[in-house]
Amino acid sequence: MRNKKSFSLYVNSAILPAMTHEIPVIYEDEHIIAVNKPARIASVPSEGIPLHRTILGMFQKQCEAQGKEFVPYLLHRLDMQTSGVLLFGKHERDREQLEAILTKKDTHKKYLALVRGIPRGHAITAKLKARTSDVKIFAQTLYKVIRVYKLLGTAASLVEAEIKTGRKHQIRQHFADIKCPVVMDGEYGDFAFNRRFRVAFRLGRQFLHSSSLEFAHPLLGKIVKIEAPLSTDLEMTLQKMVDPKILAPKRDFIETMKRSNPRRENFRKRR
C-alpha cells in the first residue's frame, strides 16, 4: 500500500489525462444515461483529484455544454484504471429507485479481464473487506474462460467475470486470491510478470473492462442491457498477443507510461 504522501503524488490532478473528446454515451432513456468510461480517470473526487478531473465532473460539464436539462449523478463507480459501462441517473426524484438497481439479485454486472495463468473452476467465493469497514463479508465472482494465450513462457486467460456482490476491487482481489491476478494490476498483481508484459505489449494499465450491465428497469418496467465495446488499448493488446508484429507507436507508449507512472518520470528528470 502507498503511504498518504506518495498517494498524493500519484494522483495529483496535474498529471491526470485531460479529455479532448466527448465521453461516449452508449445508452439513454428519460431516467438513465450510460457512458463508456475511459481508463485513467477517477469516478469521483478524492484527495488530489478535484471534481473537474473526474468522470462525474467531466460528464456533468459535457451535459451542461449540450444544454441538457438535468445534472447527471453516478449510480455506481469504476476504478480509475477500469474502462467500460458506467451508469448515471438524470433526476433527483428517481435517485432511490435507480441506486437500488445495483443491489438487485437480478442485475448482471459483467467484466472482461486478462489474468495471468489459467483459472480452474467457475466461481470464486471468498470474504472481502466491506467498503466502509475492515470487517470481511461474503463476496462471490462467477467467471468463464473465453480464451487462453501462450506468451512470455507462461499462459494468460481472457475471462468474463460476473460479480454477484459489490466489494471494493472485488474482481482484482478474487483472481489474485486464486493466484491468477489481473494482468498489469499495480496493487494485487504479479509485478515481475507485469514488467515483462508491459515491455512486450506496451499496455500501461490493468486489463479490466466493464463490458455489460443488465437489469430490470424500475421505472420503465423492462429489461435493459447496456454493452460497452472494448477500449482501443485493450483491443490492440489482444491483437498483439496473437500477432506480435502489430506494435503501437513507441512515442504513444512512452506518453502512456508517463501518465501511468509519473513518479518514474520525475525521478528521471531529477537525475
Image (cartoon, rainbow, N blue to C red):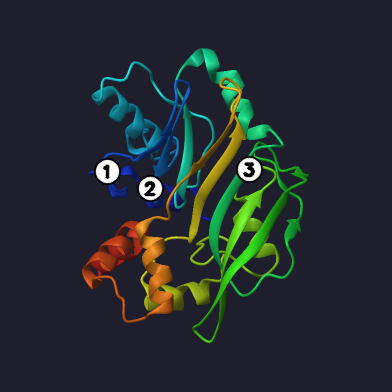
How dense is the environment of label 1, judged by Cα within 10 Å: few (below 14), some, or many (20 and up)? few
Q: CA distance from mark 1 to mark 3?
A: 29 Å
- Looking at the image, residue 2 sits to the left or right of residue 144; the answer is left
Q: Quadrant of the N terminus?
A: bottom right
Pick whichever, 87 or 48, lies toward us. Answer: 87
Disc 2 designates what residue? Answer: 38
Pinpoint residue 64: horizontal percent, then vertical percent: 28, 23
Q: Is residue 180 above or below residue 63?
A: below
Disc 1 designates what residue? Answer: 19
Q: Which label lies toward us, 1 or 3?
A: 3
Q: Is residue 111 above or below residue 90?
A: below
Assess whether mark 1 and mark 2 are in contact (beta carbons under 8 angstroms).
Answer: yes
Compare marks 2 and 1 and give the one earlier in the sequence.
Answer: 1
Q: Quadrant of residue 264?
A: bottom left
Amino acid type, label 3: His
- Looking at the image, residue 207 sits to the left or right of residue 164; the answer is left
Q: Quadrant of the C terminus?
A: bottom left
How dense is the environment of label 3, judged by Cα within 10 Å: few (below 14), some, or many (20 and up)? some
Residue for point 59% across, 58% down: 160
Which mark, residue 108? Answer: 3
Q: CA distance from mark 3 to mark 2?
A: 21 Å
Residue for point 27% across, 39% down: 22
